Image (cartoon, grey):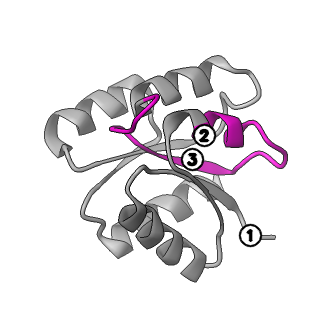
Amino acid sequence: MAATILIAEDYDDNRELLRLLLAGANYDVREARNGQECLTMAAKDPLPDLIMVDLSMPELDGWEVFRQLKADSNTANIPCVAVTAHTDQDRIRALQSGFSAFVAKPFKTEELLLTVARLVRK
């Protein structure tokens, strides 16, 4: 059975690219357009195996989404990957905050897929 990955990304082009890359690697992909939608979808059965969170989104940004996911006992153990174009400071902050990994935009396909594979195997 394929691992389920929830993508939280407000830009259609980025969300589509992630979906195509992950579906092409045989993952089951769900898509959220904003932070609030991500939280709603993350709590639905079956729970996702991994959540990729854009740090800059409307309604709830990725930082708040991550905080709420980790505060909920149902979603606290789901690995989360921070995704952003603001690399240097956000990478350090995201990893110090507890994100499982960090992926920079524009996406590097091999890096993205290796990161996802490593996290869904745990």
User: According to the image, label 3 marks what residue?
Assistant: 51
- Spatial separation of the CA atoms under disc 2 and disc 3: 12 Å
User: Of residues 108 and 29, which is closer to you in this image?
Assistant: 29
Name the residue located 41 percent from the left edge and 27 percent from the top edge. Answer: 63
Q: Find numbered disc 3 in the image and state the secondary structure of the residue it sits on.
A: strand
Rendered-image quadrant of the N terminus = bottom right
> What residue sits right under mark 1 in the picture?
2
Q: Residue 108 in the image: x percent, y percent?
A: 29, 70
Q: CA distance from mark 3 to mark 1?
A: 15 Å
54 or 92, nearer to the observer: 54
Count of numbered labels shown in the rendering: 3
Residue at the extreme left of the image, as rendered: 88
Residue that carries the numbered disc 2 in the rendered image: 37
Tell which residue pokes out farthest to the top in this image.
71
Q: Amino acid at mark 1?
A: Ala
Which residue lies at the image location 66% right of the left edge and 27% below the top edge? Answer: 76
Which of marks 3 and 2 precedes in the sequence? 2
The segment highlighted magenta reads: 37-60
97 inside magenta stretch: no
- Where residue 75 appears, as percent x and y from the top left, is 70, 31
Give the mark nearest the N terminus, 2 or 1: 1
> Tag 2, which secondary structure?
helix
CB under 8 Å between discs 2 and 1: no
In the image, is 1 to the left or to the right of 110? right
Q: Are marks 2 and 3 in contact (CB under 8 Å)?
A: no
Residue beneath the point at 83% across and 49% down: 46
Residue at the far bottom in the pictured view: 24
Give amino acid for label 2: Glu
